[in-house]
Amino acid sequence: MFEQMVFHVEHSLGHTLHFQSVLESENMKLTIHLSGQVRGGKNNTIVTRTGHRFPRPEWAKWRDAMVLSVRSQLPVGHVPICRPCAVSVVYVPEDRRRRDVPAVLDSLWHVLERAGVVDDDRWLGAGGLSFTPLDPSREKACAIVEIEEK
């Protein structure tokens, strides 16, 4: 059994989405393309005097837009992954500033979990991350996430 689906969608927030899903036997491979700068969540949390924590409104807006983008790329009838996955992330930042790699991964993992790609981001533990230098012929910034069930 082999099925392949490819989608190109223009998101209302200006993000261009490209999605390819390859389903073969019981292993699934997803490639999710997110345009724009990935915003780390570590420094975007507000802590009140009583100790309650919540995301800054700008970060929450970014996260919600990315969740919608990811959901629009999932195949119809997608069931959240609930077993270990191999993950590869290619990241093109919008500038050459140094990035906090754990914060970038954490943001992507939370977006993938909230979008329903996985039922718990603990399954994304086998991931790798590579930073790609900015290439003027490409989009300004993007993240390409490849997830393969094991």
Image (cartoon, grey):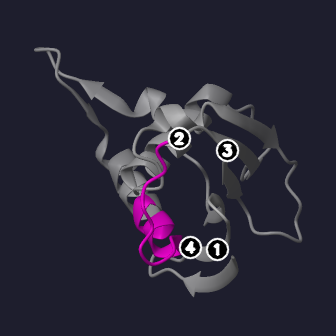
Residue, x 71% and y 59% (percent of image)? 141
Residue beneath label 3, please? 150
Q: Earlier in the sequence, mark 4 or mark 3?
A: 4
Residue beneath label 2, please? 83
Residue 36's label in the rendered image is: none
Please identify the quadrant where the C terminus is shown.
top right
Identify the element where label 2 is drawn.
Answer: loop
Q: Amino acid at mark 1?
A: Phe
Residue 23 in picture, x, y percent from top left: 65, 69
Q: Is residue 72 placed above or below 88 in the rendered structure?
A: below
Q: Which residues are magenta?
A: 67-82
Residue beneath label 1, please? 19
Q: Residues within 10 Å of mark 1 (few under 14, many from 20)?
A: many
Mark 1–mark 2 Cα distance, whole angstroms, equals: 22 Å
Residue, x 61% and y 30% (percent of image)? 125
Foreground label between 1 and 3:
3
Foreground label between 4 and 1:
1
Foreground label between 2 and 4:
2
Mark 3–mark 2 Cα distance, whole angstroms, equals: 7 Å
Identify the element where label 3 is drawn.
Answer: loop
Q: Earlier in the sequence, mark 1 or mark 2?
A: 1
Residue 108: quarter of image? top right
Q: Amino acid at mark 2?
A: Arg
Please state if 106 lies on the left or on the right of 89 as rendered.
left
Residue beneath label 4, please? 15
Q: Is residue 69 placed above or below 124 in the rendered structure?
A: below
Residue, x 53% and y 73% (percent of image)? 73
Residue 83 in picture, x, y percent from top left: 53, 40
Mark 2–mark 4 Cα distance, whole angstroms, equals: 30 Å
Q: Residues within 10 Å of mark 3 (few under 14, many from 20)?
A: few
